[in-house]
Amino acid sequence: MGARRQHVARVWQPWLSSHVLLLIPITLIVLITFADVVTPRDIVLSPLLAIAPAITAWFEGPRVTAFIGALAVAGQALTGWRHDLLLSRNILAPMAALAILSGVVVFFCVVRDRQRRQLAQVRTVAEAAQHVLLWPLPTQLGPLQLACLYQAAEEEAEIGGDLYAAARTDSGARVMIGDVRGKGLPALGEAALLLGAFREAAHQHASLPRLAAALEHSIARYLTDFEPEHEGEAGERFVTALLLEFPDDEPVIRMTSCGHLAPMLLGPYHTVTMPSLHPAPPLGIGLTDPDQHALDVVPFGPGDTLLLYTDGIIEARDRHGTFYPLAERAAQWAGHHPEALLHHLQRDLIAHTDGRLDDDVALIAIRRTPVPHPGHHLGRTFQTGAFRYPSESTES
């Protein structure tokens, strides 16, 4: 019964709000018409009736706007009839002008509604493509708790150049975060290619340098088959990526950086450290030899949290041009569950930038939990919606 009341409330509230607003143009027509009737003939107020259909177009569709326009014309006709001037040019000309103006407003309402429907279709397709490309990360991979956040720079956009993926292996977990530097549809193609290549190759290569070399081969084949349309785009077709491996039986992280930003390690007592990496050039440059990719090993014990990010967040500015202080803000919530940490960072970033981002933002928070007892099943659960907060016991 409660669910039915909530459904009725959701349907009724927009309808009620729209019809309450409709009282505004109707009231204006009544007041202007009444004032025009009771005032002397030399005082003409009927041109003000054009305000009514213009206001209605702001919150209603073409049919209701046309009705208000017809009501305004009728109000003007009533004024002429009361003054015995209905068939005079002084009344017929303003009535014709008001009818034409109302018709123009209705026409723009039709165009606007058509564009809205097209935009809704585009957003639906974009959202579906986003879910196909960026699968929701598991909330649990062995002893790891994960959470991810994607914030597109454009308000209506669902797809950007940032990407991430995770895979469970026999002895641990592998994670990738990256940023495509190309433009338009070619960049989207590179993102899809890299994500597919990682999901397939993550289980086939024993080391991260070999995995990086395999991904480089995939990118190189793509660039060979799909050359950029303009020569100036050739140098922009590359992807920065960070590959990470979390073994189950060792409290460490193995990392191979392909030109991507170093992650932040959030430790006890709200400490933040930046591991020193030896990055190779981005994918797409042509380094297909595994020896050209370094492997860095960093301690990562139970209770530690690793924050992966793209440059969109550290380059976000406020109205005064100040960059977002990610390390300082992340330290405030270092002890929180990964989902709560990203939730706080998202709200803080929006407040810092007033909701205006110049670049897409991708964040992944990974926390190592104590190793489960022998025989405990390392299950996997998948994140399917908005942030979900754990109980207080998970904060320890």
Image: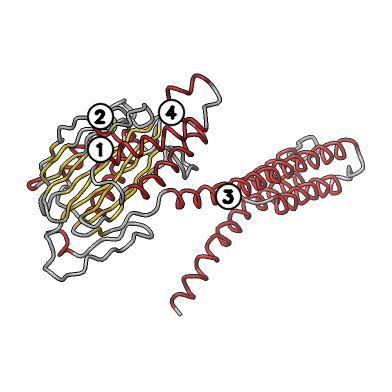
Q: CA distance from mark 1 to mark 3?
A: 43 Å
**Which picture quadrant has residue 140?**
bottom left
Mark 2 is surrounded, within 10 Å at the Cα level, by few (under 14), some (14 to 19) or many (20 or more) other residues, namely some
User: Residue 155: where, in percent of width, then height?
Assistant: 46, 41
Badge 1 vs badge 2, beta-carbon distance below 8 Å: yes
Amino acid type of the residue tagged 3 in the rendering: Ala
User: Residue 89: where, in percent of width, then height?
Assistant: 90, 36
Amino acid type of the residue tagged 1 in the rendering: Pro
SS of the residue under disc 1: helix
Q: Which residue is mark 1?
A: 209
Q: Which residue is at a point 24% across and 48% down the rendered structure image? A: 365
Mark 1 is surrounded, within 10 Å at the Cα level, by few (under 14), some (14 to 19) or many (20 or more) other residues, namely many
For discs 4 and 3, the disc positioned in front in the rendered view = 4
- Mark positioned earlier in the residue sequence (1 or 3): 3
Looking at the image, can residue 318 be seen?
no
User: Residue 80: where, in percent of width, then height?
Assistant: 84, 45
Mark 3 is surrounded, within 10 Å at the Cα level, by few (under 14), some (14 to 19) or many (20 or more) other residues, namely few
- Mark positioned earlier in the residue sequence (4 or 1): 1
Q: Which residue is mark 3?
A: 120
